[in-house]
Amino acid sequence: MILVIIASIVGLGGLIWLPKLYRWISGIKVNLSIMKSFEETQSDEIIAKVVNRSNESQYIIRCVAYSTYPASVVLFRHIKNPFLNPKQYKRIRYSSPSFDLLGNEKLKLEPFEPINLHYHFPKNHPFAKLVTPMIQVEVEISNGRIFRSSKLTVPENWML
């Protein structure tokens, strides 16, 4: 009987602390979207919606959109080079073009505050073409933690 009471108290305490633990672990949520413009005067956009899920303020120090490979290509490259130095993993995962969505300033996010970060993609610039079929956003906060969005397929006219 006493064990049942203790187990129910511990279980109730776990249910109370579970959402707090989830917010502490997840910290920031990053959603990636692309806005395609069909007018010649406007440019296409890469949009990252960043939401602070934690109960304390966070500072974003870096937000970059990388041209990336599909998961099958990344897995094949890891199998092909199994003893690669961990510092070189970015070379396997990402291609060379990267797009800075934040600039040089730091950005403060209050608890549960959403913010949209934009990059205007040039339409006819030859160096702005991607060689990989996907794009992913990586956000780094002031304590060094890195959060990534899910991968998104890019439009055909962005490809080389």
Image (tube, rainbow, N blue to C red):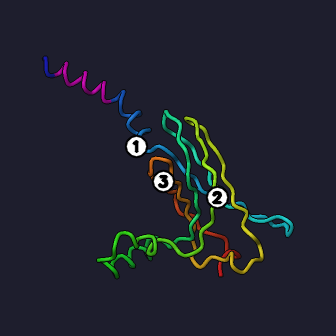
Q: Is residue 9 magenta?
A: yes
Front: mark 2 or 3: 2
Residue 14 position by quadrant: top left
* Magenta region, residue range: 4-14
Task: Give SS at disc 2.
Answer: loop
* Secondary element at tag 1: helix
Residue 48 percent coordinates (x, y): 62, 54
At which x and y percent is residue 107? 61, 46
Q: Earlier in the sequence, mark 2 or mark 3?
A: 2
Residue at position x 51%, y 45% from top?
A: 28
Dot 3 amino acid type: Phe
Q: Amino acid at mark 1?
A: Ile
Name the residue that disc number 1 marks. Answer: 25
Residue 101, numbered circle: 2
Give the CA distance from mark 2 to mark 3.
14 Å
**Which residue is located at x 35 percent, y 69 percent?**
86
Query: What numbered label is drawn on residue 147?
Result: 3
Cα gap from disc 3 to disc 1, whole angstroms: 11 Å
